[in-house]
Image: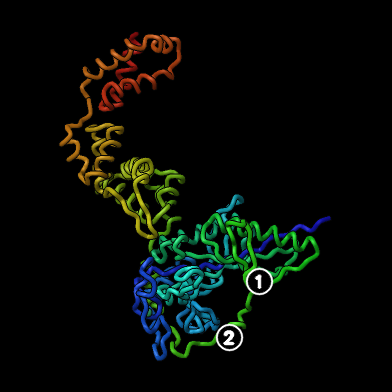
Amino acid sequence: MATTYEPVIGLEVHAQLFSKTKMFCGCSISFGAPPNTQVCPVCLALPGALPVPNARAIELAVRAALALGCTVNERSVFARKNYFYPDLSKGYQISQFDLPLNTGGKLVIDTPSGPREVGITRIHVEEDAAKNLHGVGHGTDTLVDFNRAGTALIEIVGEPDLRNADEAEAYLKKLREVLMFVGVNDGNLEEGSFRCDANVSIRPVGQEKFGTRCELKNINSFRFVRKAIEYEITRQEAVLSAGGTITQETRTYSDGLGKTIPMRTKEDAHDYRYFPDPDLPPLVITRAFIEKLRVTAPELAEQKRTRWQKELGVTLYDATVLTGHPKIADYFEEAAAALAGKDASPEARAAAGKKVANFVQSEVLRTVTTRGLEAEFAVSAEYVAELLRLVEGGSISGKMAKDVFAEMITTGRSASKIIEQKGLSQVTDTSVIEAAVAEVLAANASQVEKYKAGKTSVVGFFVGQIMRATKGAANPQLVNDILKKMLDAQ
Ligand SMILES: [Zn+2]
């Protein structure tokens, strides 16, 4: 009988800390700046330049660790990770090794068989390398852009607790969400500020000992994570089933080829000759500092989803869409609170929440552009709340609200201004509506017959016709009431 194998997957995520400057110097790190314009003697590794740790970056690393249930170590040590590569002009990367800033922790992911806890081994701080730009300049030249060199990162090393590509994807998405909601990372895979390497091995089911692992690099989308891991599992199974052995190596994923290809045999930790960086004293932070960050920790997306379902009348689905980005979550809460008003009862808050959730999902989200931690809303949350209040008060219909909202986007004006200027208002005059209903019923005698024969579904057709006849201005509730009365009188 053929051996059945079980995959063992652990992810290492590099997340760029949301700091304005680099890890050990004051250079700015804006993405897309002209090459080699955001550099100084420290990040270019000129002789005699000394690194100074970025306090803000350390704070963000601790915030991330607290959100992931890690132990924050009051004393940690920066170490040199030595290797040679053109994008590393110092010949070493400043990282942390045996005494990292944060250890232990966990992330709970949702799987088809329920929630599952995935261990986090450690979260340490380090600096990024520069970037090799291949095939630029003269023909096939490779040039180096040092703008990225020294950028502050955390590396989140996960335990090998994942068992398939679905779980790996779920872990990555959840981790990204946590880091974004804590405000430490912009979650941008495309620009490389959230990067993942995957360690994949397989072992016969029932065997305790891990198989030989391969490290997969160059995974810059959630889709690639799944495809790269699935390909790698299949490849390793084929090698072992044919009686071969797995070579410990680093492989890269090529989307064009749809497979992983070998890059280099994988180094072991001792190959890097780690040692404490003599330029940097041990990093010491106080218990009070850690506790201050613990009590000021922002609410996570998961907590928001639970609370909103309880307090703001939304479904889990709504809450999940609205926590797609921290700025969208804030916007929703602000608009819901503004619509409910101060001192609203729990019922009123829930009703307002539901209305805002619907409007934000159907109208607002179409017009939002997000770039990393930045989300650009064309209309303020206050203005959306005012618009919905006008619908609630009967000044305009829900349908008119959509047109008014479109106008608000292009003009930047408030709903009440637009309604006033355009002379828009909802038709609540029953005689006007009665006239429209009578006209529609007279023009559609065959549909009226169908209604009388018991086909009540034609009501929707009539409502549509009446709304069209009144250019969407008729109060829908009045239309329904009057239509019902007049149909039944036929
Ligand atoms: Zn610098």
Q: Taking 364 as reference, is 53 above or below it?
A: below
At x 58%, y 56%, the residue is: 256
- For the residue labelled by badge 1, is the local secondary structure a helix, a strand or a loop? strand
* Amino acid, disc 1: Glu
Count of numbered badges drawn on the protein: 2
Q: Taking 403 as reference, is 120 above or below it?
A: below
* Amino acid, disc 2: Arg
Query: In front: 144, or 19?
Result: 144
Asked which colour scheme the image uses, the reply is: rainbow
Q: Which residue is mark 1?
A: 249
Q: Ligand 1: which quarter?
A: bottom left
- Is residue 303 at least partly visible in the picture? yes
Q: Is residue 134 left or right of residue 444?
A: right
At x 39%, y 22%, the residue is: 460
Q: To which quarter of the image does residue 233 belong?
A: bottom right
Q: Taking 150 as reference, is 13 above or below it?
A: above
Which label's residue is closer to the chain start, 2 or 1?
1
Query: In front: 15, or 391?
Result: 15
Considering the image in quadrants, where does the N terminus appear? Answer: bottom right
Return the x and y of residue 331 as percentages of the image width and height.
Answer: 32, 51
Q: To which quarter of the image does residue 455 belong?
A: top left
Query: In front: 416, or 128?
Result: 128
Q: Which mark is residue 325?
A: none
Return the x and y of residue 211 as percentages of the image width and height.
Answer: 71, 68
Considering the image in quadrants, where does the C terminus appear? Answer: top left
Q: Which residue is mark 2?
A: 273
Name the residue at the right extreme.
Answer: 1
Mark 1 residue's CB less than 8 Å from ligand 1? no
Question: Which of the two discs, 2 and 1, sits closer to the camera?
Answer: 1
CA separation, marks 2 and 1?
19 Å
- Is residue 347 at least partly visible in the picture? no
